[in-house]
């Protein structure tokens, strides 16, 4: 059993989707799924939660660096393949996935030592929420940041809706969250989303310099300063993320989410106009085949979707 006096070392941990390295007081956690742009499936979140807890116990570690494998992506948020295969048809499972996402965030927030996001590539959706969870961030100049929820059937309420207004101001937060456009590295620096922007080949050096500066501070003072400055992160997150977890679970059953997920699988944009046309015409935008409002006069089947022309039980034509 784990104990805070004897935290597991990197080689003792069974990690498949993370790399955990520790050297000279600096721990580097790498999301190691470059083939899928370091997106977050359930196992990855479980591993992050465990490693962040272990690091909070480890007195050999003074600074934690979070990054992604390769040079394409830091993290691109939820694993859409997993969402399609394991959640879309059983929306209640989203509540379970989101619970693990929240747990990973809370373990990182409460890690008790300074954290640096090493943004090695694109930083999208939940990936940007992990970027904002970290205390400081250094970004490669070829990367960009983007929130995509309103374009892809979700709401970025796992940190972005709570933290962006605090970090970049209300109007800029709305622009990021509502328009879902790419934020270049230079704009991210100007808006306060990151602390530094450097060429990719200078990223490790810049992160190492910052980490060493943090190591040359008093650890207990640093821990409490972190706790105090985390007030504006913890308060809005704690007040809203539980509600968001339940709403997002319910919304996963909505036709908006179905269309967005299908569009992602088909490598196209969702049909936004079709959704709006359904609403404006009084049709159902909540159900795939329309509201369950028809009955079959032949066999008595009830709650048949309003777009059906024939009964799904007996095959009779519907009036």
Image (cartoon, grey):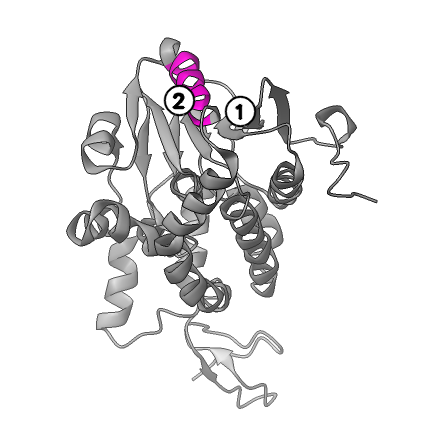
Mark yes or no: residue 127 visible. Answer: yes
* Quarter of the image where one finds residue 49: top right
Asked if the stretch drawn in magenta spans residue 127, the answer is no
Q: Which residue is mark 1?
A: 34
Instruction: Identify the residue at image location x=40%, y=51%.
Output: 228
Dot 1 falls on a residue whose secondary structure is helix
35 or 316, which lies in front? Answer: 35
200 or 71, which lies in front? Answer: 200
Nearer to us: label 1 or label 2: 2
* Quarter of the image where one finds residue 170: bottom left
239 left or right of 165 in image: right
Q: Where in the figure is residue 237, as x and y percent of width and height?
A: 42, 59
Dot 2 falls on a residue whose secondary structure is helix
Instruction: Identify the residue at image location x=64%, y=27%.
Output: 60
Mark yes or no: residue 177 visible. Answer: no
Q: Where in the figure is residue 167, as x and y percent of width and height?
A: 27, 46
Q: Which mark is residue 277?
A: none
By secondary structure, the bulk of the magenta-drawn segment is best described as helix
189 left or right of 109 in image: left
Q: Which residue is mark 2?
A: 210
259 or 41, which lies in front? Answer: 41
Mark 1, residues whose alpha carbon is within 10 Å: few (<14), some, or many (≥20)? some
Instruction: Identify the residue at image location x=64%, y=43%.
Output: 53
Q: Where in the figure is residue 223, as x and y percent of width and height?
A: 49, 42
Residue range (magenta): 203-214
* Quarter of the image where one finds residue 15: top right
């Amino acid at each position: 059993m784990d104990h805070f006096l004897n935290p597991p070392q990197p080689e003792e941990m069974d990690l498949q989707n993370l790399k955990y390295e520790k050297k000279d007081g600096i721990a580097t956690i790498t999301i190691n799924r470059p083939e899928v742009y370091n997106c977050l499936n359930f196992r990855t979140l479980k591993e992050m939660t465990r490693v962040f807890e272990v690091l909070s116990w480890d007195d050999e570690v003074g600074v934690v660096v979070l990054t992604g494998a390769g040079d394409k992506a830091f993290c691109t948020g939820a694993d859409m393949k997993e969402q399609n295969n394991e959640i879309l048809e059983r929306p209640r499972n989203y509540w379970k996935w989101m619970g693990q996402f929240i747990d990973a965030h809370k373990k990182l927030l409460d890690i008790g030592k300074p954290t640096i996001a090493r943004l090695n590539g694109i930083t999208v959706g939940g990936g940007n929420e992990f970027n904002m969870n970290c205390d400081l961030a250094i970004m490669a100049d070829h990367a960009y940041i983007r929130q995509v929820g309103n374009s892809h059937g979700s709401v970025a309420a796992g940190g972005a809706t709570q933290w962006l207004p605090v970090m970049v101001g209300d109007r800029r937060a709305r622009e990021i969250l509502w328009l879902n456009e790419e934020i270049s590295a230079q704009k991210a620096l100007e808006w306060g989303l990151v602390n530094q922007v450097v060429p990719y080949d200078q990223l490790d050096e810049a992160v190492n310099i910052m980490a060493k500066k943090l190591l040359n501070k008093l650890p207990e003072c640093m821990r409490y300063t972190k706790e105090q400055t985390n007030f504006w992160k913890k308060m809005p997150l704690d007040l809203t993320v539980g509600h968001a977890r339940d709403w997002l679970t319910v919304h996963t059953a909505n036709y908006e989410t179905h269309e967005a997920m299908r569009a992602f699988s088909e490598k196209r944009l969702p049909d936004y106009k079709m959704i709006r046309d359904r609403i404006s015409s009084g049709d159902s935008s909540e159900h795939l085949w329309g509201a369950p409002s028809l009955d079959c006069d032949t066999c008595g089947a009830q709650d048949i979707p309003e777009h059906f022309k024939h009964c799904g039980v007996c095959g009779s034509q519907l009036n």
